[in-house]
Image (cartoon, helix red, strand yellow):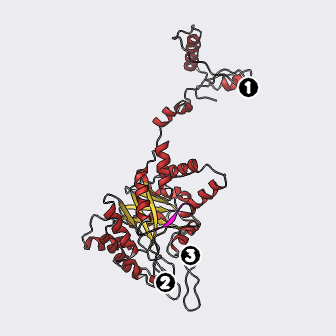
C-alpha cells in the first residue's frame, strides 16, 4: 500500500487495478484528477519523421503505474548513464607489475600467467614499459627474478647496489624520467627459504632482524631512483623503521606504499612461479613453514586490518594497500572509510589467471569481465590498482 492510501480505502475490483490504480487520499486524488484532465487534451506537437517503436506481439494493455519516481529514467540512454556514472576508471588508476630477469636477452613466458613474461633486463623491460606508457599507464612496480646462486638464507642480495632490482630501477628512471617507479621490499625473492623474512631453525620468522635488512633494501632502492618503496613483508614495525632510514639518508620525498592488509591467500600461486620464490620443503634440521600464516593476515579476519592500518598510518605510510583485491572488497571499503590516506589494491596473479582461463574457455567475455572487476575494485575505494591487465585495460578504456 502506498503512503497516500487510507486505511479505510475499499479494495479495488481487480488485481490489475490494485497494482496500477495508484495512490488514494485527498492530495493524491486531486493530483490524479488533474493529470487525467491534462491527458484528455488533444496532442499538440511539432511534426516529426521519427517512427514510433513497435510493441511485441502479445503485450498486455495495462494502465501506467502511478509512480512518483522511476529510477530507470536516469538509466535510459548512454548519455544519461555516462553523466550520472559515480565511479570513473582511467589508466591513471593503474600500476603495472613487471617481472624482470637478467639471464639472457629473451623474454621468458610465465606458463600460469598467459600473456605475461619475465622481461629481459637488457631490452624487454624497456620495450614493455614503453608500451604501457603509450597506453596511458605511467606507473610500474618492479619484481626481480633472482638467480638461485645469489640466494642466501638471509637474503643479502636484496640490498646489493648492483642487484637486478637496483639496476632495473636506475635504467627505468634514466630512460623515462617521469615514470613513477614502485619497488617491492621483502626478502622472499632473495631468500633460499622462500619467506619474506629470515627463518630460524624452528620455523619462526625473525621480525626485528628482518626489518634491519629491509631498511637497507629500501635505502638501496631509493638510491637507485625509486619513487615509492613498497614493503610487502608484513613484519611488525617495518614502516616506521623504513621511514626513519629513508629520512636519515635524505630521501624525505620518497613515498611508502605499505602492504597494510596482505592476506595469507591462495591466489598468489602464479606469482611465486613467476619469481620461483615459493617456500621449499624443510627438513628435521631446519623447519620451513609451508605458508606465510605466521605473518600474513588470516582471510577470516576483518577487524585486524584496522589495527594494521592504524599502525602503518602512525608510522608514516603514504599509501595503504589491500592484497588480494577481488575477494577483499569489504576490506578495501573498510580501510577507505577509516583513513584519509590513499588506498591501493592488488589484483593478484591468481585473479588474473582465473580471468584468463575463463576467457580462453569461452565462459566470459574477457574485456567486459576485466573492466567490471577493475571498476568494482575502484568503487570499493581503491585509488590505485596493481593489475597485470593494466595495458589491456587502458587500451579498452580508450576504445570505449
Q: Nearer the viewer, mark 1 or mark 2?
A: 2
Give the crowd class for mark 3: few <14, some 14-19, many >=20 residues within 10 Å: some
* Residue closer to the observer: 109 or 270: 109
Is residue 110 left or right of 381 when viewed as pictured? right
Residue 313, position as x, y percentages in the image: 37, 64
Dividing the picture into quarters, in which one does residue 293 lie? bottom right
Which residue is disc 3 drawn over?
291
Give the Cα separation between the discs numbered 1 and 2. 73 Å
Is residue 85 left or right of 284 when viewed as pictured? left
The first of marks 3 and 2 along the sequence is 2
Residue 51, position as x, y percentages in the image: 60, 18
Per the rendered image, the range of residues in magenta is 114-119
Q: Nearer the viewer, mark 1 or mark 3?
A: 3
Which residue is disc 1 drawn over?
15
Is residue 165 left or right of 15 when viewed as pictured? left
Which residue is disc 2 drawn over?
199
* Residue closer to the observer: 200 or 349: 349
Give the Cα separation between the discs numbered 3 and 2. 12 Å
Above-or-below relation of 150 to 386? below
| Residue 26 covered by magenta stretch | no
- Which quarter of the rendered picture does the N terminus lie within? top right
Amino acid at each position: 500500500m502506498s503512503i497516500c492510501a487510507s486505511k479505510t480505502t475499499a479494495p479495488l475490483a481487480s488485481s490489475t487495478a490494485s497494482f496500477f490504480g495508484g495512490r488514494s487520499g485527498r492530495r493524491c486524488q486531486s493530483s490524479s484528477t488533474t493529470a487525467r484532465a491534462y491527458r484528455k487534451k488533444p496532442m499538440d506537437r511539432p511534426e516529426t519523421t521519427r517512427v514510433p517503436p513497435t510493441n511485441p506481439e502479445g503485450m498486455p494493455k495495462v494502465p501506467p503505474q502511478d509512480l512518483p519516481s522511476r529510477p530507470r529514467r536516469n538509466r535510459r540512454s548512454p548519455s544519461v548513464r555516462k553523466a550520472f556514472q559515480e565511479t570513473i576508471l582511467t589508466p591513471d588508476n593503474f600500476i603495472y607489475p613487471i617481472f624482470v630477469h637478467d639471464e639472457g636477452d629473451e623474454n621468458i613466458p610465465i606458463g600460469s600467467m598467459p600473456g605475461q613474461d619475465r622481461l629481459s633486463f637488457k631490452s624487454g623491460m624497456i620495450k614493455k614499459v614503453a608500451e604501457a606508457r603509450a597506453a596511458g599507464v605511467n606507473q610500474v612496480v618492479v619484481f626481480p627474478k633472482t638467480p638461485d646462486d645469489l640466494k642466501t638464507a638471509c637474503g643479502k642480495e636484496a640490498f646489493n647496489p648492483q642487484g637486478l632490482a637496483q639496476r632495473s630501477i636506475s635504467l627505468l628512471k634514466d630512460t623515462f624520467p617521469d615514470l613513477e617507479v614502485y619497488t617491492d621490499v621483502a626478502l622472499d625473492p632473495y631468500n633460499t627459504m622462500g619467506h619474506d623474512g629470515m627463518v630460524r631453525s624452528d620455523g619462526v620468522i625473525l621480525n626485528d632482524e628482518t626489518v634491519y635488512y629491509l631498511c637497507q633494501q629500501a635505502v638501496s632502492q631509493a638510491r637507485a631512483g625509486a619513487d615509492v618503496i613498497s614493503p610487502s613483508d608484513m613484519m611488525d614495525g617495518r614502516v616506521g623503521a623504513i621511514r626513519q632510514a629513508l629520512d636519515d639518508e635524505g630521501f624525505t620525498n620518497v613515498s611508502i606504499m605499505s602492504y597494510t592488509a596482505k592476506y595469507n591467500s591462495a591466489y598468489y600461486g602464479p606469482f611465486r612461479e613467476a619469481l620461483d620464490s615459493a617456500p621449499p620443503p624443510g627438513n628435521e634440521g631446519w623447519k620451513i613453514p609451508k605458508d606465510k600464516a605466521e605473518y600474513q593476515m588470516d582471510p577470516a579476519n576483518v577487524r585486524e586490518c584496522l589495527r594494521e592500518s592504524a599502525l602503518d598510518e602512525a608510522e608514516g605510510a603514504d599509501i595503504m594497500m589491500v592484497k588480494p583485491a577481488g575477494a577483499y572488497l569489504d576490506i578495501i571499503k573498510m580501510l577507505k572509510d577509516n583513513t584519509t590516506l590513499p588506498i591501493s589494491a592488488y589484483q593478484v596473479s591468481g585473479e588474473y589467471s582465473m580471468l584468463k582461463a575463463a576467457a580462453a574457455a569461452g565462459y566470459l567475455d574477457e574485456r567486459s569481465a576485466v573492466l567490471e572487476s577493475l571498476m568494482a575494485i575502484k568503487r570499493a575505494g581503491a585509488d590505485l590498482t596493481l593489475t597485470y591487465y593494466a595495458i589491456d585495460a587502458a587500451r579498452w578504456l580508450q576504445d570505449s
